[in-house]
Image (tube, rainbow, N blue to C red):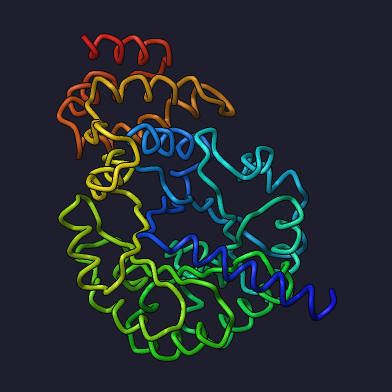
Amino acid sequence: MSSHALSQAMQQRQTTIQQLFASPVRLLAPMEGLTDPLMRQILTQIATDLGRPYDWSVSEFIRVTQHVLPAHVFYKYVPELHHDAKTASGTPIHIQLLGSEAQLMAENAAYACELGAPAIDINFGCPAKTVNSHRGGSVLLDEPETMYQIISAVRQAVPAHIPVSAKIRLGYTDTSRMDEIKAAIAASGADWLTIHARTKTQGYKPPAYWDKIQSFNTLDIPVIANGEIWNSEHAQNCMAQAGTRHLMLGRGAVTRPDLVAQIDREHSQISNVQTTLLWQTLIAHQIKFLQGEAKSDIVLVGRYKQWLAMLTKGYSEAKILWDSIKREKNKAAIISALQMSER
């Protein structure tokens, strides 16, 4: 690519980022085994119907280990690549990669872009023991130099107009390396940073330390806050303490699929829209989930029960339904119970 073309591509990327972050960003978090393509389809549709679409969502991490992954692996995790990398409701999907070998990560990122990825996100936040024991995810927070090498290699490998972002926690066992992590991010060429406001050791145990995100605002890139946001009040407190307008919503968005609309009620893109998702309305989405694609009905029922168990924290009706179907294995019977609860 000529220097002029490169300059134009970089300017295009900067314009894209300015447009993405011109207003407060709300994105749906990548959660392994939870926000899979089917769940993304349901949750982004609900958000769109409620007048506050997600700005984008991020795929579950795609593990990079020994080689450039074949196309079918990317399509398995991100079938939206067949549809301009967007869900049926039009929400863009960014591809997340996880690994520790800089060159291999770069090659896979470049191939993901060939397949249509609109942006690449790099996972330094996953706390899972199996991932960390294989030198992936949050364990790399103890290796800021490796983080720098991975992000910069990916940045150089993907087309200049494609954004590259990173997701981190505050540290691995503690927060003592925050300054080193910040310096690595600053030097790497990352276009924005998402921060889960806990260390790996703190896992998902409350509270989240939103105020510690504040120190990353000295970076010359947008910062997105994440962690322990279950309602609108939490969101407002998080933004105030973290010093950023931008949020990534995770388990709270699964428990209350209307969370994004509740947070930005006054900024709804549909006038006079009901921003509260009633249980009766959510039933149709649950049935659609149960009618989705999966390896088998057993898998689909298991995934649905996982969601329903989370919904019990947000809806009293979900607790009643859960008590009646928690041992049920027949999909048709569960759909029938859902339809009965609508009456």
Say if 115 sits above or below 150 in the image: above
Report the residue at 35% width, 30% height from top.
305
- Location of the C terminus by quadrant is top left
- Location of the N terminus by quadrant is bottom right
Q: How many marks?
A: 0
Q: Is residue 318 left or right of residue 108?
A: left
Report the residue at 52% width, 63% height from top.
131
| Residue nearest the observer in this picture, 140 or 169 | 169
From the top left corner, tell me how far across and down residue 68 is, in percent.
77, 60
Q: Which corner quadrant of the image does residue 177 belong to?
A: bottom left
Q: Which corner quadrant of the image does residue 306 belong to?
A: top left
From the top left corner, tell me how far across and down residue 83 is, in percent.
65, 38
Say if 335 sits above or below 319 in the image: above
From the top left corner, tell me how far across and down residue 162 is, in percent.
65, 64
Report the residue at 45% width, 44% height from top.
35
| Residue nearest the observer in this picture, 207 or 86 | 86
| Residue nearest the observer in this picture, 175 or 326 | 175
Q: Is residue 165 left or right of residue 331?
A: right
From the top left corner, tell me how far across and down residue 171 is, in percent.
38, 79
Q: Residue furthest right?
A: 2
